[in-house]
Image (cartoon, coloured by chain):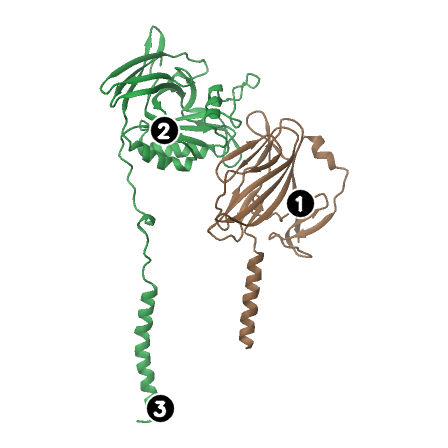
Chain colours: A brown, B green
Amino acid sequence: MKKFFTLFSFLLAVAAASAQDVHYAFADKDGNLIPDGTTIVCSEAEDDGFGGVIVNSGLHITNVAAPSNYQVSITANVTRMDNGSFQLCFPQNCLTWNTTGVHEAAGKGPVAQGELKNILSEWLPVAEGQCVATYTAKSYQGAFAKQSYTVTVVFKYGAAAINATAGDTPGVTGCYNLQGCKATGRSGLLLQRMSDGSVRKLLKK
Amino acid sequence: MSQATKYNNVRAWTGRLCMPLAMSVLVLLCACDNIAEDDRLIYEAPAAVNRSVLIEDFTGQRCVNCPNAADEIHSLQQEYGDSIVVAVAIHGGPMAVKPNPARPNVVGLATDLGDAYHEHWKVEQWPMGMVNRSGICQYTDWKSRVREQIALKAPVNITATFSDVDGQPTVGVETMGLAALADAKLQVWLVEDSIIATQLMPDGKANAQYLHRHVFRAAVNGEWGTDLSVAEGQVVTSSFPVTLSEVWQRNRLAAVVFVYDDSGVLQVTSAPLAIGQE
């Protein structure tokens, strides 16, 4: 009877753990997961090679625990775009928009377990300003959506936009490990979520 | 016989029986899966060639995934030869870059006509393309489309040559009907190969030394070509003078000539501009 209860508890624990498993998550170029619901700021403008600039989101999508028959779709809800255009290239085709709204990537695509795929999304400003996009990755088994994961990116271009919140000193509202779980008093690479919605990397020794 | 001896005998027999039984079960469990014929990995020989195919590659210099489509074309040309797979990279739409006199150091490859073709074929994401105008599709589908299209018999043969007529570069076209053809169109395009210009790459970075292949430059005989009707066995000849731009490299120019109708592209060929070279 004792063994039965032990087995039952174990199965229950496994079921509970798998229910909480994240299928797909957004990550940075090094594979560090960006916690669900996070807002990050991107203000590094690069030369686009054509006389303009490009502000890259740096967002990647990774398969954390999605089964091999799952696929992921990505939508970007662009709530603000002061100028220029916004691009998203996932899974293999590129789309571009110059208006706000909910924009869907060109279909669903597979991402293998452990694979880190750049979603190649960026804002191409033509003047100083901001662009705000909330990305949602949805896992699908066939036609059925299973789970979603959201990250908001605030793109900033130009000194005025970047310094717009320079007077504020944001406080730390949460600390997470690279798996996106709350972490307290731990050492290693941690992610600090700030009161202004941004996220900072912190190496704690 | 003592109780212990009986027990030992039974144990020995059980041991002798268990091992083969276990092995048999193991063999049964390890039996090969029955893989459906469609799922087997078998060598697929290139299809028999009955006609050349035209790939219209809708592309743009700001499109990070477009070099993947160019690689696919290169791979298909390696497999079939570039006289069988004739490709034209049509730069247009919002991800393309147009020449801009205010930025003379930026080489833009888009044209107004390229934009018009993108609009006509309702291209809204990149890269996309058409194989013999059999419908817009993603580059990952081009291989199978090429296979389908080259297996179809061409109703017309085309021979194209560049010549110099009184100092005027001219494309001469000879079409021979292999079947009666009415309401078709003959289209002559000019493409330039191997242009080095900036391209955004799949890693999101700009590559200033990217080699752009078979870039659409102009339509020689109008946006949608000229009318063509030909009877079976009949030969129709025509010639089209070409006006060259100073920015084009003559030794990299070629004419792409094709016949199409409502069903798609029926035959295609290309001819290099071999005149006026040093």
Q: Secondary structure at mark 3?
A: helix
Residue A21 picture location, percent across and down: 56, 55
- Mark yes or no: residue B109 visible: no
Q: Counting residues from the N terminus, which is met first, the one under dot 3 or under dot 2?
A: 3
- Res B102 quadrant in image: top right
Residue B214 picture location, percent across and down: 40, 24
Q: CA distance from mark 1 to mark 2?
A: 50 Å
Say which chain tag 2 marks.
B
Q: Residues at badges 1 and 3 in contact (C-beta under 8 Å)? A: no
Same subunit, labels 1 and 3: the answer reads: no
Question: Of tags 1 and 2, which is closer to the observer?
Answer: 2
Q: Decide: few, some or many residues near mark 3? Use Cα within 10 Å; few <14, some 14-19, many ≥20.
A: few
Q: Nearer the viewer, residue A47 or A18?
A: A18
- Mark yes or no: residue A37 visible: yes
Q: Decide: few, some or many residues near mark 2? Use Cα within 10 Å; few <14, some 14-19, many ≥20.
A: many
Numbered tag placed on residue B132 in the rendering? 2
Pointer 3: what residue?
Answer: B4
The residue located at (34%, 83%) in the rendering is B11
Q: Secondary structure at mark 1?
A: strand
On the rendered image, what quadrant is the C terminus of chain B found in?
top left
Pointer 1: what residue?
Answer: A199
Q: Is residue B8 above or below residue A13?
A: below
Q: Decide: few, some or many residues near mark 1? Use Cα within 10 Å; few <14, some 14-19, many ≥20.
A: many
Q: Residues at badges 1 and 2 in contact (C-beta under 8 Å)? A: no
Q: CA distance from mark 1 to mark 3?
A: 76 Å
Say which chain tag 1 marks.
A
The residue located at (38%, 12%) in the rendering is B242
